[in-house]
Amino acid sequence: MAASLLALLLALPAAAELRLELRRPGGAETALGVSVSRVFRSGSVPCPGARVVLTLPSGLESEEKAEASGTARFDPRNLSYSLPPTGAATVRAKAECAGSSGKADFSLSGSELASYSREASSKLTDDGVRLAGSKRFAEARLRFFQALELDPASARARFNLALCAERLGLLRLAASEYVRYLSLHPEAQDRTSLGRKVARMARGLNPGLPLPKVAADLFETGRSEAAAGRYNQGLAAFSAAQVLAPWWPEPYRASGLLRESLAMRGKGAFAVHAEAALSDLEAFLEAAPGDTRASDIRARTERLRSIRSGLNAPQRIRIK
C-alpha cells in the first residue's frame, strides 16, 4: 500500500501544499506523532516516507521518517529534556515529501511530554501486575523493565520488578531493585522489613553487592555529627546510609548504639529511642549474624528488652 501511495504522490502536481498536524499520545499510543499530508482542492493524501524534523527551543533537532500512515513518531523522552519543565514552548516542525515541503509550529512543554511517558509506564506496570498475578513472572518482568524505560522514577514498577526477580530466583537483580525502590521511596512503611530481606539476599551473593560511595560518605558524616554532639543529624545520616545500602551492617550498629546511649542517658523519651535502637541492632544481627561483635549486640538488645518490660509492667498501688 505504501508503494502505491508513493506512486500516486509522484504523479500529483508538485505545487501541492504539505499539512503538518500534531498527534498527541493516547490509549495504547505512547509516541508523539506528526502527520504529514499533501493537500489539493479535491482533498488530501498522506505522505508515507516524509522526512520530518522537529527543532526544539534549544536548537536541538530530532528527525524521523513517516510511516505508511504518513505519521512520523517521536519518543517523548528524547524531547522532554530539551523543553522547559513548566510553561509551553514553541517546537518548529518541517517536512519534505515528493518534492513538496511544509512547516508548522506546535506548543509543547516538558511536563506534558513527561506525563505521556508516566501514563504509558503506568499502563505497562498494570499489565505486569496482572501477569504476575497469573504467575507469569518472566513476562511480567519484561513489562516492568519497559515501564521503567519510560519512567525510571516509578517506585511501583521498581518494587514489582524486584518482586518478580525474587520469584524467578534472580536474587542479585531483586536485591538491587529493592534498594532502588527504597531510594525512590525512603519513607515506605515496609522499609525495615525490605532492608532485612535485602540483607539476607546479599549474604548469599558472591561477589557481594558493591557499597555505594555516597552510603560510605553518609556513614562517616553520621559518625562525625554524633561525635560533635549533633545527635539528630548523626541519626539522619545513618538512616540515609541504611536506605542506600540496606545490606551493610555498619550504619545499623552505629545508629543502634547511639540510640541506646540516648535512651539510657534520658535524652528524650526512653521508649522512642529504645524501640528504634532495638530495630537497628536487630537489623545489624540480620545483616551480619557471624560478626565478632554480634554477641555484644545481642546482650544489648536483651538488656533493652528487659528494661522495656519493666517499664511496661503493671504498677501495684499500695493502699495504706
Image (cartoon, rainbow, N blue to C red):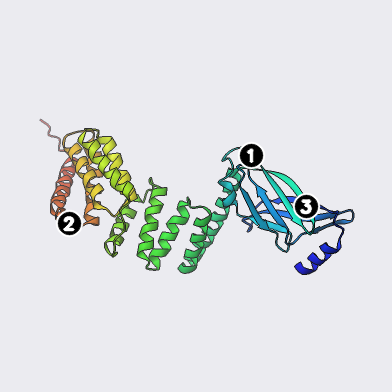
User: In this image, 155 relative to 226: left or right?
Assistant: right
Could you give the CA–CA distance between mark 2 and mark 3, rounded to whole angstroms?
73 Å
Mark with earlier residue (3, 1):
1
Query: Which image quadrant is residue 160 in?
Result: bottom left
Q: Position of residue 73 (x, y in %)?
A: 66, 56
**Callout 2: few (<14), some (14-19), or many (20+) C-alpha neighbours within 10 Å?**
few
Residue at left offset 25%, top offset 43%? 220
Q: Which residue is mark 2?
A: 291
Q: Which mark is residue 88?
A: 1
Could you give the CA–CA distance between mark 3 and mark 1, rounded to whole angstroms?
26 Å
Q: Residue furthest left?
A: 320
Q: Are marks 3 and 1 in contact (CB under 8 Å)?
A: no
Q: Position of residue 231 (x, y in %)?
A: 24, 35
Q: Residue flagged by tag 2: what amino acid is it?
A: Asp
Residue at left offset 44%, top offset 56%? 158
Q: Is residue 211 above or below residue 201?
A: above
Q: Which residue is mark 3?
A: 101
Tell me the element at label 3. strand
Q: Residue flagged by tag 3: what amino acid is it?
A: Ser
Nearer to the camera, 192 or 47: 47
Mark with earlier residue (1, 2):
1
User: In this image, 159 relative to 208: left or right?
Assistant: right
Looking at the rendered image, the disc whose residue lies closer to the viewer, 1 or 2, is 1
Q: Position of residue 187 (x, y in %)?
A: 38, 45
Residue at left offset 20%, top offset 40%? 258
Q: Residue flagged by tag 1: what amino acid is it?
A: Ala
